[in-house]
Image (tube, helix red, strand yellow):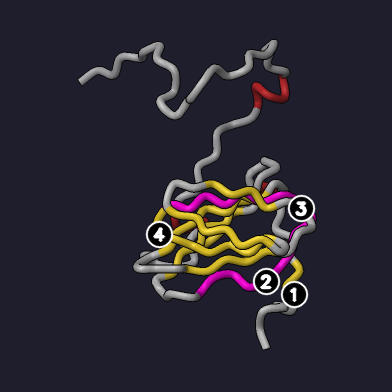
Amino acid sequence: MKHTPHRLRHPATVGTPEPFEWSASPADQQRQPTILHRQDWASHDHLWRGLFEGRNIGTGTTVLFYSTEEIGVGPMWHVHPYDEIFIVRTGRALFTVGDQKIEAAAGDILVGPANVPHKYYNLGPGMLESIDIHLTDHWIQNDLEDPELP
């Protein structure tokens, strides 16, 4: 079956994107698309867990994939010098960002500001999966003492 291109806007688009003056420089025209296969980023066989750093593929964004089936488990209290965007793919999580507690569920997106400590854990029931977008070309993190732990 022959594929026929269409002129429909991307199905994820809500609203109207802002147009811009486009022209490709010679350097832009030399760039090639990059594909990362699961074995290039995943650290687990069947869970969405792993990362890729933007500097390794020529972009300014680093992405971490996190998943756990264990209730009450998640990334420890830590901080980054850049904003982080959390996309909850599956399940429910309790985020602590600074002094705020935020419950998020599948489909929710949360932005953690630069230099504000944060953590989250699986509220259950079932699997928690998130995509954590770090607005930097490489992962920088300081793990901190959790003020909520004895």
Name the amino acid, label 2. Trp
Q: Tell me where the magenta segment starts and ends, as one range.
A: 73-89
The answer to which of marks 1 and 3 sits earlier in the sequence is 3
The quadrant holding residue 25 is top right
Residue 34 horizontal/vertical position (percent):
55, 39
Q: Nearer the viewer, residue 150 or 114?
A: 150
Alpha carbons under labels 4 and 1: distance apart: 26 Å
Name the amino acid, label 1. Leu
The answer to which of marks 2 and 1 sits earlier in the sequence is 2
Residue 81 horizontal/vertical position (percent):
79, 56
The residue that mark 3 highlights is 114
The residue that mark 2 highlights is 77
SS of the residue at dot 4? loop
Name the amino acid, label 3. Ala
Q: Badges 3 and 2: C-beta atoms under 8 Å apart?
A: no
Alpha carbons under labels 1 and 3: distance apart: 15 Å
Name the amino acid, label 4. Gly
